Image (tube, rainbow, N blue to C red):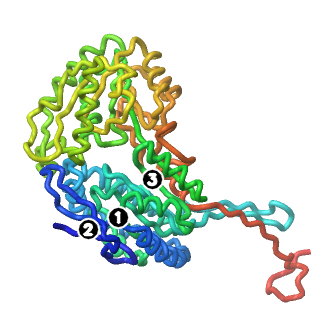
């Protein structure tokens, strides 16, 4: 049984709380490890060490920070396959999906390598006679990240790369369901030359989270998770004087117009709806089929699902892995039953699929004739369940999307450039794809939704991430006119 420790002061640190949590291989259902769950005192110790480390790291030159970031980038690339294998073993997603997660995290590290340029300020000469004004950005000190189980490598890299590049110390509280990826990344940070204490990992549950949210020496908290928890993190953190960016849940819609390529739209719906077993905040969970395309589109999606290979994520032939826990599998299956009871047509039932005997597997499910009052529409299911809602017109589909309380990502499939432009202009959602089902921004933009999908003022990573992890300072300065000085300054005096 693997014992998963904290990482404090640059080294693995055994837990002292006496509490542990189980870690499973979702593909077999077997417990593979035990993770230490931190007490409030353990969190406070990590923060105290991080606070001391932040003072030193803040003084590090930009060239030194960039050197560490570049070295970390190279180490991360060299260990990408190892990190992806760890993600697969504890999360369950197929290895190719895990490798893609690591690659997206790597992009964020590459962005952060440019920190000398990213935090440049501005300068105004002669704002008044003999007076210059300039702006600078400075680190906050100790910042923390609370990250979800579904992206145990990528989301910490969203946060930590920018936070550390900007001169902060970063305390990570990863999901206790798949904690091992964070420890490999901690080792790579150390090998890259990051001073001890600048990156820490404390595993834990609610006790650790509440300590982070209320600790007076933590200046900012980044969070990704469900909307109820995101709201709690935001309200508690801000009430304790912290900056908070809290990304919540999603119910992402894909609007398919009658002129769309049915084959392209069906392929996109399958990959975006069932990839990573639907355990993505950017997964498509609702297809809004407009007009006569609905029937052919449903048939095309249904025809693809028997070909979707469900199995152990470590098997290169698998295209969809298990869910994270047995409890979550039963919860998702309950939504399928509720949809059927409320009147949805179960086109493909994942509960009846041929699946591995062991593990937390559930097959891909397709529901048609879903209405906005059904729980399969209103709730974030976070599983391999795709709902089809039929709309009479583009306007009806747009109104449906804009009425939804979640607004993380959306997509439109059409051949009509005018309709696509109107959609990106009018839709009230933070990230929009045009014939792209999962519009995750690249690292040099920023990630985040609207409405109940985001609590706080700034999105994650990219330019807004740099802004979040620094604070601005403006300096106004005047120096004596050298022509009036009685000291010989060694240059001609002006008249």
Residue at x 23%, y 64% (from the top left corner)? 34
Compared across the picture, whether 345 is left or right of 356 comes to right
Q: What residue sits right under mark 3 in the picture?
A: 223
Residue 24: quarter of image: bottom left
Q: Is the residue marked by circle 3 packed among few (<14), some (14-19), or many (20+) residues within 10 Å?
A: many
Helix, strand or loop at label 2? It is strand
Residue 297: quarter of image: top left
Residue at x 22%, y 41% (from the top left corner)? 329
Q: How far across and down, in percent of the image, does residue 344 sit?
A: 28, 19
The span from disc 2 to disc 3 (Cα, nearest Å) is 22 Å
Q: Is residue 457 visible?
A: yes
Q: How far across and down, in percent of the image, does residue 295 sit?
A: 25, 14
Could you tell me which quadrant the C terminus lies in? bottom right
Q: What residue sits right under mark 2 in the picture?
A: 4
Between circles 1 and 3, the one closer to the viewer is 1
Q: How far across and down, in percent of the image, does residue 177 sit?
A: 28, 55
The span from disc 1 to disc 3 (Cα, nearest Å) is 15 Å
Q: Is residue 337 above or below residue 13?
A: above
Verify CB contact (< 8 Å) between mark 1 and mark 3.
no
Specify which label sits upstream in the sequence, 1 or 3. 1
Which is more toward the observer, 52 or 17?
17
Verify CB contact (< 8 Å) between mark 1 and mark 2.
yes
Q: What residue sits right under mark 1 in the picture?
A: 203
């Amino acid at each position: 049984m693997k014992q998963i420790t904290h990482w404090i002061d640059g080294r693995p640190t055994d837990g002292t709380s006496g509490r542990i949590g189980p870690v499973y291989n979702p593909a077999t259902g077997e417990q593979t490890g035990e993770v230490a769950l931190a007490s409030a005192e353990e969190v406070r110790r990590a923060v105290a060490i991080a606070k001391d480390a932040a003072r030193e790291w803040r003084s590090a030159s930009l060239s030194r920070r960039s050197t560490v970031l570049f070295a970390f980038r190279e180490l991360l690339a060299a260990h990408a396959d190892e990190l992806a294998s760890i993600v697969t073993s504890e999360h369950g997603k197929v290895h190719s999906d895990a490798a893609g997660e690591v690659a997206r995290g790597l992009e964020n590290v590459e962005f952060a390598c440019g920190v000398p340029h990213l935090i440049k300020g501005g300068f105004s000469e002669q704002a008044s006679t003999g007076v210059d004004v300039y702006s600078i950005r400075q680190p906050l000190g100790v910042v923390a990240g609370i990250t979800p189980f579904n992206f145990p490598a990528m989301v910490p890299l969203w946060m930590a790369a920018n936070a550390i590049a900007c001169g902060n110390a970063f305390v990570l509280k990863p999901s206790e369901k798949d904690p091992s990826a964070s420890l490999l990344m901690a080792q790579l940070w150390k090998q890259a030359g990051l001073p001890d204490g600048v990156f820490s990992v404390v595993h834990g549950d609610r006790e650790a989270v509440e300590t982070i949210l209320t600790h007076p020496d933590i200046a900012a908290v980044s969070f990704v998770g469900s909307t109820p928890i995101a709201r709690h993190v935001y309200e508690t953190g801000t009430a304790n004087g912290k900056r908070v960016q809290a990304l919540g849940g999603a119910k992402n819609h894909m609007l398919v117009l009658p002129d769309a390529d049915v084959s392209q739209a069906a392929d996109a719906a399958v990959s975006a709806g069932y990839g990573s077993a639907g355990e993505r905040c950017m997964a498509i969970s609702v297809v809004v089929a407009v007009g006569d395309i609905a029937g052919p589109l449903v048939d095309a999606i249904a025809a693809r699902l028997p070909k979707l290979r469900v199995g152990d994520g470590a098997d290169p032939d698998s295209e969809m892995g298990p869910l994270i826990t047995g409890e979550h599998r039963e919860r998702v299956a309950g939504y399928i039953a509720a949809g059927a009871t409320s009147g949805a047509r179960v086109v493909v039932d994942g509960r009846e699929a041929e699946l591995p005997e062991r593990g937390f597997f559930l097959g891909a499910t397709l529901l048609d004739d879903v209405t906005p009052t059904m729980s399969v529409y209103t709730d974030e299911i976070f599983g391999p369940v795709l709902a089809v809602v039929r709309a009479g017109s583009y306007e009806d589909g747009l109104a449906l999307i804009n009425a939804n309380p979640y607004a993380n990502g959306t997509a439109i499939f059409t051949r009509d450039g005018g309709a696509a432009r109107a959609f990106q202009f009018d839709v009230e959602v933070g990230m929009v794809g045009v014939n792209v089902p999962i519009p995750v921004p690249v690292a040099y933009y920023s990630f985040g939704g609207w409405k109940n999908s985001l609590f706080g003022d700034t999105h994650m990573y990219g330019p807004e991430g740099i802004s979040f992890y620094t604070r601005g300072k403006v300096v106004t300065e005047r120096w004596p006119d050298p022509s009036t000085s009685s000291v010989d300054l060694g240059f001609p005096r002006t008249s």
